[in-house]
Image: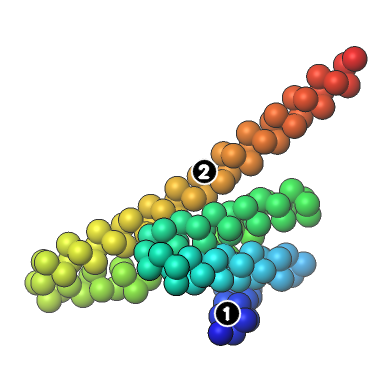
């Protein structure tokens, strides 16, 4: 089942990468990043049954692999992260939030919108944390390299 999830997410991310005009050489890497993020999401969700936690871990995996690919292949991180993060975006949550408003079901609106906001926030936090940690590690590595090169 997990292999099926991997393949389907890989194919869907290729579609989004083509839609976003990602360079052809970067499309498989972006798809791999997103597929790994989706598989991480599914695995964590099956263990903890928390959509927010699973989305956070999945987005961390996407952001980390995107940072690695960006540095390795001299591309912008957004080339990999934008199409790869799409499977984790809470589109159905946004739809059901709007539907609850239209139907005047304010209880459902409150519960669905809060979960959707937490999921979107977890994606943003995961990207922010991963990007910041990567920059700190690169800065420390460069500082140590320069320090020892002066000797």
Local crowd size for mark 2, using a 10 Å CA cut-off: few (<14), some (14–19), many (≥20)? some
Q: Nearer the viewer, mark 2 or mark 1?
A: 1
Residue 19 figure quarter? bottom right
User: x, y (%) of residue 57?
Assistant: 50, 58
Q: Residue furthest top?
A: 151
The C terminus lies in quadrant: top right
Q: Residue furthest front?
A: 47
Task: Write the residue at 58% across / 58% down.
Answer: 61
Q: CA distance from mark 2 to mark 1?
A: 27 Å
Q: Is residue 78 above or below residue 151?
A: below
Task: Write the residue at 45% across / 72% down.
Answer: 46
Residue 37 vs residue 101: left or right? right
Contact (Cβ within 8 Å) of mark 2 with mark 1: no
Judging depth in this view, the residue of 99 and 34 nearest the camera is 34
The mark nearer the N terminus, 2 or 1, is: 1
Residue 24 vs residue 13: left or right? right
Task: Write the residue at 57% across / 39% down.
Answer: 132
Residue 27 vs residue 60: left or right? right
Judging depth in this view, the residue of 141 and 70 nearest the camera is 141
Which residue, given by chain and number where applicable, does mark 2 sit on? Answer: 129
Task: Work out whether residue 51 can be spotted.
Answer: no
Residue 109 vs residue 22: left or right? left
User: x, y (%) of residue 71?
Assistant: 74, 48
Which label number is shown at residue 2? 1
Residue 110 figure quarter? bottom left
Task: Write the residue at 56% across / 84% down.
Answer: 1
Q: Tag 2's secondary structure?
A: helix
User: x, y (%) of residue 85?
Assistant: 53, 63
Judging depth in this view, the residue of 44 and 146 nearest the camera is 44
């Amino acid at each position: 089942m997990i292999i099926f999830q991997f393949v389907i997410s890989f194919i869907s991310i290729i579609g989004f990468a083509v839609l976003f005009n990602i360079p052809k050489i970067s499309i498989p890497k972006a798809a791999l990043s997103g597929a790994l993020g989706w598989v991480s999401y599914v695995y964590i969700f099956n263990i903890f049954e928390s959509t927010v936690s699973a989305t956070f871990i999945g987005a961390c995996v996407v952001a980390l692999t995107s940072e690695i690919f960006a540095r390795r292949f001299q591309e912008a991180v957004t080339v990999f992260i934008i199409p790869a993060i799409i499977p984790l975006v809470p589109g159905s949550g946004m739809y059901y939030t709007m539907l609850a408003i239209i139907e005047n079901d304010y209880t459902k609106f409150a519960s669905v919108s809060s979960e959707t906001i937490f999921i979107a926030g977890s994606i943003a936090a995961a990207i922010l944390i991963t990007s910041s940690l990567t920059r700190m590690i690169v800065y420390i590595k460069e500082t140590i390299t320069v320090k020892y090169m002066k000797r």
